Image (cartoon, rainbow, N blue to C red):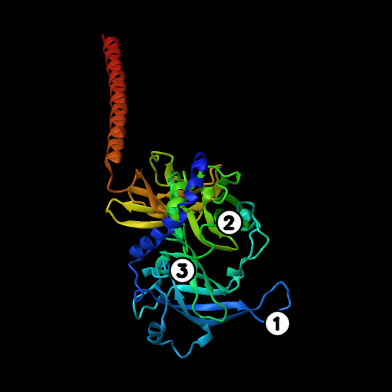
Amino acid sequence: MQRGMISTNRGKMSEFLTICKLSIIAFTLFFGVSGSGCPVLECWFVQEKPGHRGGFTVPMDQEKSLMFITTEAYNEKTLSELHPPADISPSRIYHVTDPAGTFCSSALNPPKGSVNKPKCEINPFMPHASMVRWAAALTDSAQSPVYLQADWFSVAAQGLDEQLTLSNIMRAPSTSKEPKVILSVSSKTPVVRSRLGEQVLLDCGFWVDPSSPLHGSGFSIEWRYQFRGEGRLVIAYDGKNDWFAETSETGADIDVTALYESGNASLVLEEAQVRHSGTYICTVYLPHLLAQVAVDLEIVEPPSLSIYPSPLPLLVPGQVVVAQCEASGFAPHTLELGWEFTGADGKSRSLGQGSVTGHRQASDGTFSQSTRLELDSGKLKLGRGGEVTCVAKHEGEARRASATLNVIGVSAPSIEDSMAMVAVALVLYGVIKVLYWTISSADSSDTDLKDKKEK
């Protein structure tokens, strides 16, 4: 990691305010937003049911809600121009000010009449001090700032076609329905697929409202991995004290310079391995606040195919040749194997799956699997032979491997059959010739002996 930059990054903290002001302009240009260009976002407001007294299962209430979004503060005129639907409670209609336009992505604003809608959920949020070591310094004071005395909300949104995932923390004066985005964490790569050995970028960026008292008071970044109930810390960085927490992860990095300059907290995996498949959670900590987004990474590697024996031996009617196809080095483990036969007429047909083995996993996490097929010219109607093909269907890529099969001793002889018959004919001709010479020699000897006796 770029830990050698620690001594230089402290000076950058003083420039953070100016940089974030510029970031507002950059966000606005990127999304192409204006007050009227932001979506009206339909959401579910989810919270615990009142009166809950503990237990393993927490009953939840959810209500339809609506967010009118603008990049500039609302006034009486702009509020009067809004017409919320009657089927949503006025208490669940929010007029959101989003200075950076983080909600104004096209991924959250589908065309009118579109069946597909972005997903959005609003939850009440309670500011609290973080307990992790790399964020503890953000709240080293035991006092709770007066600024926190307000209504806080967290909003989780997922854009169309896996283009965006977003987590925003909003603050509204008590009893007000006009919250403002204070912290935004987003990723433009919610789902990433990679081949083995490739460099992988998991996007994550954050923005902090420059007008907030929390701005300039430090931040911390955390990347954590989760898969099937297991997890591990990948990277943790304390931006206030400029240090990295020790982790056992290797080959993972973040760009500290980009972190300070543009809020780019993206994670880079130098060389993708099967063990990297899973969910990566990017968490950004501010004093008493946090927001996080999840990025799913799937390592997809298609199989390599080989047919044995190679080449296939000649097949004589009545005999059986066993062909084996080995698929190796693939991930994930889901694979469909089968056989095809293409005859001399060029027509292809399926020969079935054959006898398929179970999966075997290599030390690098990739899988292998094989299938055996008994080639019986009579049962499978192979004629004079053709091309036998092993087909592997995998989500990474379909693969095929072929071998030529020759069948001898059938009608309409092939070149091999003709050569074999010529060889047999020559052998028979030789045998007959030898017998003829032998008989002729014996007859000549008997005649000579008879003549001598008569004399």
Q: Nearer the viewer, residue 220 or 405?
A: 220
Q: Position of residue 220 (x, y in %)?
A: 55, 54
Q: Which residue is mark 1?
A: 51
Sequence order check, earlier mark of 1 and 2: 1
The amino acid marked with disc number 2 is Phe
* Numbered tag placed on residue 377 in the rendering: none
Distance Cα–Cα, label 1 vs label 3: 31 Å
Q: CA distance from mark 1 to mark 2?
A: 35 Å
Q: Residues within 10 Å of mark 2 (few under 14, many from 20)?
A: some
Q: Tell me the residue at 57%/77% (across/down).
A: 46
Residue for badge 3: 158
> Between tags 3 and 2, which lies in front?
3
The residue lying toward the viewer, choosing from 437 and 16, is: 16
Residue 227's tag is: 2
- Residue at 33% x, 56% y is 348
Residue with the most extreme bottom position: 86
Which of the 4 image quadrants contains residue 175?
bottom right
Amino acid on which the number 1 mark rests in the picture: Gly
Mark sitting earlier along the chain (1/3): 1
Work out whether mark 3 precedes mark 2 in sequence or the reverse, and give the earlier one: 3
Secondary structure found at label 1: loop
Residue 68: which quarter of the image?
A: bottom left
Nearer the camera: disc 1 or disc 3: 1
